[in-house]
Image (tube, rainbow, N blue to C red):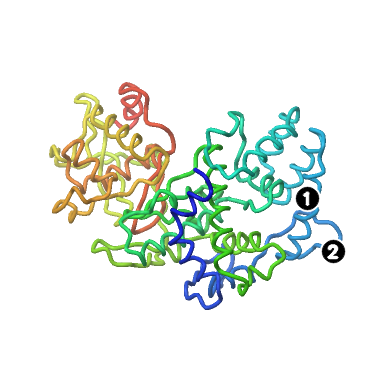
Amino acid sequence: MKKAEYLAQVQDFVAWMARHLHRGSQLKHHYRRPGQANAVQFANLADAMDKYEWPIAAAVRGAGNSDHSLDANTLVLARLQAALKAARTDDEARDACIAVMQWGGVVNGNVDWLKKNTTGLHALLENVSALLREDDDNPKRLPANLRFNAGMTKVYSLKLDNFIIYDSRVAAALCWFITHWAIERKAAQIPEPLRFPCMPAKEGDDPEIRKVRNPSSERWQFPRLNRPCMHAHWNLRASWLLEAILELAGPDTVFAKSSNRLRALEAALFMWGYDLGRNLPGIDAAGDVIEISEAEELAPPEADDIETSALVSGGYELSTLARRRKFFWHFNEENDLIITGNNNAAQNQLTTTQMFYYLHALYERFDWGAIPLANNLDYLRDIDSAPDGLGTTLLSLLEKPLPLASRLGAILVALGQLSWNHQPKNITFQFNAPPPADIETLRRQLSAYAR
């Protein structure tokens, strides 16, 4: 799609978002960082820019740049940009890229790749940069060997003018604002041109606070980013979008007064998107706007815990993810059945074949994107208008009751097939890996849970 065509499709959001660049915006945000008693609070997006901070790595800091401010980082980025643009050989391009990775804190994986792929690197960077300068976001134009991730987006943001860093924090914040726009417009869904993909935060298995960087709910969905060419595609669209928003907002914003207005807006979004979980927009069953409660986040049941836990008479113990209701489940090898209760009722059972087709139906529909729980009993009154998800797919494909999805969701998380967003409301799931390629493979996985 050409730039002008794309911007014509999103002009209503551009006009809405332009108003929120001014200090008069009432959209606020807050979150708490691990180890900090007080919450980080932003009165508006302009306030987030004022509070920007990023610790500059010693390797690229230079003299006089020991603070974390936007001004200090701007000076470092200007020096890194000059080195990138001045590079004429593969070795120079590699070294300039490594310095960018050091600044961005994304050396893992990226530096090794740069060293292994030094030959031809300069030409690759120039070729991709030339393609991204054109007003065409068709991902098929990009080279098959494209590397584009949270590290390379930083490189291309310096190689190109008016090209933002599209990482998990910027993506999260942008989708947060798009969700608020959708709420105000009472949209039935997020329009495709605004369905920006999100990326999970990099964190350990048991963080003090699990960060949320995807505001998806049952009604409003943002997919998970999973391919380099699509990262570049949406990075380009985000750059066009923010540039148009800044242009419409005019000269009286704090961003317009910055030496690089696009970088300043990107910095504000970066601060905003650190964690959406404490101020996540959503809807209740009636369609009214709600706020996610600040209840303690619930850790998902882990497969290792189940496998080593005591086997009770009813099977292996789990809890549903939202209401933490205990249930027992097991795999009946003799009858080839997944049983999710003690009463052996047919409505609580799935055959291995049914589970196989169920997983593949979900994967075909959602791919790596967010999958709503979608098991509200109210949907039975008008199933055609209900969102696709675990429950509605279960009902339409297998004619199983919607509430069974709560148990299946917990089981699939325990098996490691799915992950979830750790929210007590507006629960969504994502595939960790493609479904088993055949029924026998799935059967072998389930056999570990036979009693």
Q: Which residue is drawn at the image coordinates 72% and 29% (left, top)?
A: 116
> The disc labelled 2 sits on which kind of residue?
Gly
* Residue 422 lies in quadrant: bottom left
Farthest-out residue, right: 63
Could you say where residue 40 lies in the image, as x and y percent from the top left? 56, 70
* Residue 34 lies in quadrant: bottom right
Q: Is residue 134 above or below residue 120?
A: below
Q: Is residue 243 above or below residue 253?
A: above
Farthest-out residue, bottom: 24
Mark 1 neighbour density, 10 Å: few (under 14) some (14–19) many (20 or more): many
Q: Is residue 43 visible?
A: yes
Could you say where residue 277 lies in the image, as x and y percent from the top left? 45, 61
Q: Is residue 334 above or below residue 163?
A: above
Classify residue 235 as left or right of residue 297: right
Mark 2 neighbour density, 10 Å: few (under 14) some (14–19) many (20 or more): few
Quadrant assignment for the C terminus = top left
Given residues 5 and 298, the one toward you in this image is 5
Could you say where residue 290 lies in the image, as x and y percent from the top left? 34, 67
Instruction: Between label 1 and label 2, give the one nearer the viewer.
Output: 1
Dot 1 and dot 2 residues touching (CB under 8 Å): no
Q: Is residue 451 visible?
A: no
First reached walking from the N terminus: tag 1 or tag 2: 2
Question: Mark 1 to mark 2: distance in Å?
Answer: 16 Å
Residue under numbered circle 2: 64
Residue under numbered circle 1: 80
> The residue tagged with tag 2: helix, strand or loop?
loop
Q: Which residue is drawn at the image coordinates 24% and 41% (left, top)?
A: 393
Q: Is residue 274 above or below residue 167?
A: below
> The residue tagged with tag 1: helix, strand or loop?
helix
